[in-house]
């Protein structure tokens, strides 16, 4: 029998399909729910994230591009969100022929979301295709048209105070989409979101095979950490480690690790010059390649801003 949750608004939500379970912890469950003829997502979250969500919802009230909760139940620690058909990641995996014009529309909307976030000095820190939610319509001929796009999942979002960077003793964000400084957990800023967004652009425009790791078991067998492999790839694609990145990270151990990954990447590029984004990115066209190059520059202080 389906259970129910009553939101702060007094609206009743009937829980149905469980969409996700984190670490088999019932306190961190995500359900699809129905209320009337509408679909919603109910997310049971820890108290710190519940409180963070209230702060974000107050600061970004009425946002069209940021996925803020629309109802809540404080006693159960549940946040209520509108339901979206898919994520950008799943959409492209399931429909490799999804129209280019509609892909660009998704990126434009995601960029507007980041602009809104950065405009109030918040950083997302986990920009990736599965945190970009998409609704679309389909006509009788099967042509899909994007109707709504929103950036979600602010579990580790952070407000920068006084121009300071985010410093943690561990890497933050998804390893696949992190900036180089994000892999170290040091010196994370708005520019770190921009690097991740640049990777999302590459993925969306058809470059997924350059970014996604599909050989985790082989890496483990060879004693290589995924983060190490990703860093080497990024240095191969976007160039050797610059002084600006080392200054931003400001850690002797991490600087040595970054230099080591960069040296391995440079050896690979000598044998395979086509690894550079300036080579394989040409098929995207000069304007797109130039825009993405600005976002994926390895010096955080020189990256293109969202504006």
Image (cartoon, grey):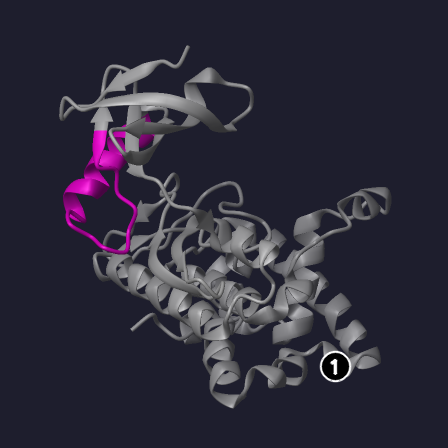
Q: Is residue 72 above or below residue 53?
A: above
Residue drawn at x 28%, y 56% as measured from the top left: 65
For this orientation, the residue located farthest to the bottom is: 286
Residue that badge 1 annotates: 274
Q: Which residues are magenta?
A: 48-71
List x then y, in percent, for residue 25.
50, 18
Left or right of 57? Residue 218 is: right
Work out whether residue 122 or residue 299 is closer to the camera in this orientation and state it. 122
> Residue 194 appears in which quarter of the rendering?
bottom left
Quarter the C terminus occupies: bottom left
Quarter the N terminus occupies: top left
Whether residue 121 is visible here, answered yes or no, is yes
Left or right of 71? Residue 148 is: right
**For the residue labelled by badge 1, is the local secondary structure a helix, a strand or a loop?**
helix
> Residue 52 appears in which quarter of the rendering?
top left
Work out whether residue 235 or residue 243 is closer to the camera in this orientation and state it. 235
Residue drawn at x 64%, y 62% as measured from the top left: 211
């Amino acid at each position: 029998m389906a259970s129910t949750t009553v939101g702060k608004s007094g609206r009743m939500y009937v829980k149905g399909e469980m969409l996700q379970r984190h670490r088999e912890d019932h306190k961190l469950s995500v359900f699809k729910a129905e209320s009337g003829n509408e679909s919603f997502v109910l997310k049971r979250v820890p108290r710190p994230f519940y409180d963070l969500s209230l702060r974000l919802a107050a600061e970004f009230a009425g946002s069209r591009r940021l996925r803020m909760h629309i109802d809540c139940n404080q006693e159960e620690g549940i946040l209520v969100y509108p339901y979206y058909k898919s994520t950008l990641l799943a959409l492209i995996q399931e429909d490799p022929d999804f129209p280019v014009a509609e892909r660009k529309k998704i990126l434009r909307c995601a960029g507007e979301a980041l602009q809104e976030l950065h405009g109030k000095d918040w950083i997302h820190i986990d920009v990736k295709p599965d945190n970009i939610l998409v609704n679309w319509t389909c006509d009788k001929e099967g042509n899909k048209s994007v109707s709504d796009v929103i950036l979600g999942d602010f579990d580790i979002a952070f407000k920068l105070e006084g121009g300071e960077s985010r410093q943690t003793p561990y890497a933050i964000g998804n390893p696949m989409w992190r900036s180089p400084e994000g892999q170290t957990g040091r010196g994370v800023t708005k520019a770190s979101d921009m690097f991740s967004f640049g990777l999302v652009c590459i993925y969306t425009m058809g470059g997924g095979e350059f970014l996604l790791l599909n050989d985790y078991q082989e890496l483990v067998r060879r004693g290589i950490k995924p983060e190490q492999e990703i860093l080497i790839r990024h240095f191969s694609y976007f160039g050797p480690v610059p002084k600006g990145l080392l200054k931003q990270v400001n850690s002797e151990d991490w600087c040595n690790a970054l230099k080591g990954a960069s040296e391995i990447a440079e050896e690979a590029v000598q044998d395979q010059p086509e690894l550079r984004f300036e080579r394989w990115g040409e098929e995207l066209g000069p304007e797109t390649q130039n825009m993405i190059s600005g976002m994926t520059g390895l010096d955080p202080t020189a990256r293109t801003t969202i504006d």
